[in-house]
Amino acid sequence: MRPTESIPMKKRSIYLLSILLVSISFGQSAREKLEEIAIIDQKIMMPMRDGVRLATDVYRPKTNEKVPIIFSRTPYNFNSWGDGEERTRTYERALAAVEKGFAYVVQNERGRYYSEGEWDILGVPLTDGYDAFSWMTEQEWSNGKIGTLGCSSTAEWQMAVAALDHPSHAAMVPMGYGAGVGTVGGYYEQGNWYRGGAFQMLFASWLYSVEHDKFKPRIPAGATQEDLIRISRFYDLAPENPKIEDMMAAMSHLPVQDMLVNMGGKREIFDKMIRRKPNDPAWFEGGLYHDDMQINKPSFWFVSWYDVSVSPNLALFNHMRNHPDKEVADNQYLVIAPTLHCGYFRATENTVVGEMSVGDARNNYDEMIYGWFNHWLKEDGKGDFLEDLPRVQYYLMGKNEWRTSEIWPPKEASMTSFYLDSDGNANSLFGDGRLSLNPPSEPNQDNYTYDPHNPVFSYGGNVCCTGNAIEAGARDQREMETRNDILVYTSEPLTEGIEVSGFIEMSLYVSSDVKDTDFTVKLIDVHPDGTAYNLDETIQRARYREGYDKEVFMEEGEVYKIDLTPLSTSNYFKKGHRIRIEVASSNFPRFMRNLNTGGNNYDETEGVVAHNTIHHSAEYPSQIKLPIVGKVKIEDR
């Protein structure tokens, strides 16, 4: 499948007013076109089993034939009558679906905007999704087959609901779905709340921006569809909280448990979640999917290299490919794009992710998605679509081209160890840290000081939803690497290019003078001119090194093996490039600072300084294992 042609972006010199008029004009034409070809039924209050009603818009073709349904459920506002950004996108999605013979149904989660009830993350209870499938199936215009579609919050609820196995749920397309994955394999992220046992602070920013209750007293219980349509035409219901000018400063507030209150936001959901440990039973009672929940649905998974949860997303695809039912296993497909969170359709002829160009990263997403739904939802839709669809499509950065594979990682990839080494001074870019194919010939160690009140700041990365606190994507790390609390290990230049595609494992042998601290790693592609672009990053809290069901604290003078949560990428390190990793103990505000006390962290205001050590020797072989396609050849020095 060849990439589609993209629409050139408007020049920045166009006046804001002109852009606004163009946007409004397009929004109106989409709505007017829908009115010509679709039956539009807005603000249907769909009843759930407990009597709560969820606000739902239906767009369906003007036909007497029964039609399949594409269903999206969201916590975001699609309800205003005018031509705001989300409303315009809703019209465009509905138009695309109706033109292709589908009904498009969009619904607000419980407690959001016009939907009744109390909101919680992922729109629990889980039965709301099941009840929505039943209601849609019973409509006289429905052919009884439903496909679910969406990215991020419109994808994250799909997996757990799919595990309920409603007979009408025929197929799904989850995109950027990581915050809906609780546990899969060795990943205990609990919906991106944690990585390696450390809190991912994106939720402080995201909850501030979306959680509000200004609207609750404004819509009386039992309001009619006519009343709700009238309100939506003339009233902007519950705008989101105002933007924080300096989200970095806001996220630096201690104690962390008071962060949202300090921003002027709501705290109820944050309060209960910040106190949960990685294996808290509450994580297994809501809307998160866990890998002991069986999904029997054909699934087309979309993942991004610079998304917040690329590794557990890929682990879930592999989990589904190992499904005990071969028919289910054979109907799992995957696309991995070189974009930020939900950035698939924003790829251009020159796609820039952060500061790094990854070339022409476009793909035929609409063609693939609607081909998928044609196949699974329409009686006459089955043809050779699946025969022509590659099992895995992944973008190889560096070579900047789409590749295909039958499995992930590609079968040609084999794990190759690179060992950390130095003369005892790997601190900063100017140190002597080395990354070698051979284990260290002499035992040595690198020492650094981690002060939680002067953390290493996040620069770029595989992030989402942090407001202006972090600029996501690939960014030149050299300025960050001037810090002495970052250990830098770099290989010699490659004499031939190599492809690194798959899961990346990292083992460190560490010691510290505190009970608990964190260890962070970044994988970096160093260009011949010294530019150092980050590929992926991870973290591990030392107290969880033996599993997330217990806390085991460190003792001074003891050496411990830390296996970090695996990273993922697909990158071609060209001839002359070097492979680098950074090791530190903070990556803030991507991850919450460990205050090094051994306490809760979330209710503390004062930390202690940690003196941390990375050991490397035959006895303590600290190393990174890379999935390499081909043979590594490095300059001799």
Image (cartoon, rainbow, N blue to C red):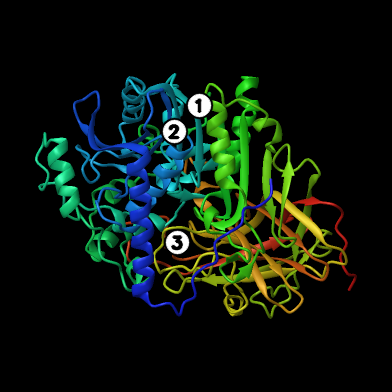
Query: Which element carries disc 3, helix, strand or loop?
Result: loop
Q: Is residue 422 left or right of residue 558?
A: right
Q: Residues within 10 Å of mark 2 (few under 14, many from 20)?
A: many
The spot of residue 435 in percent (x, y) is 76, 65
Please tell me in which quadrant of the rendered image residue 210 appears. bottom left
Q: 164 above or below 513?
A: above
State the quadrant of the N terminus: top right
The mark closer to the camera, 1 or 2, is 2
Q: Amino acid at mark 3?
A: Asn
Check contact, mark 1 vs mark 2: CB within 8 A: yes
The spot of residue 252 in percent (x, y) is 36, 68
- C-alpha distance separating marks 1 and 2: 9 Å
- C-alpha distance separating marks 3 and 1: 54 Å
Mark 1 = which residue? 377
Query: Which element carries disc 1, helix, strand or loop?
Result: helix
Q: Which mark is residue 543?
A: none
Query: Which element carries disc 2, helix, strand or loop?
Result: loop
Identify which residue, 381 or 150, lies in the foreground: 381
Q: Amino acid at mark 1?
A: Leu
Q: Residue at x 58, y 36 (%)?
A: 371
Mark 3 = which residue? 596
Q: 86 above or below 467?
A: above
Q: Amino acid at mark 2?
A: Phe
Count of numbered labels shown in the rendering: 3
State the quadrant of the C terminus: bottom right
- Which residue is most to the right? 636
Mark 2 = which residue? 102
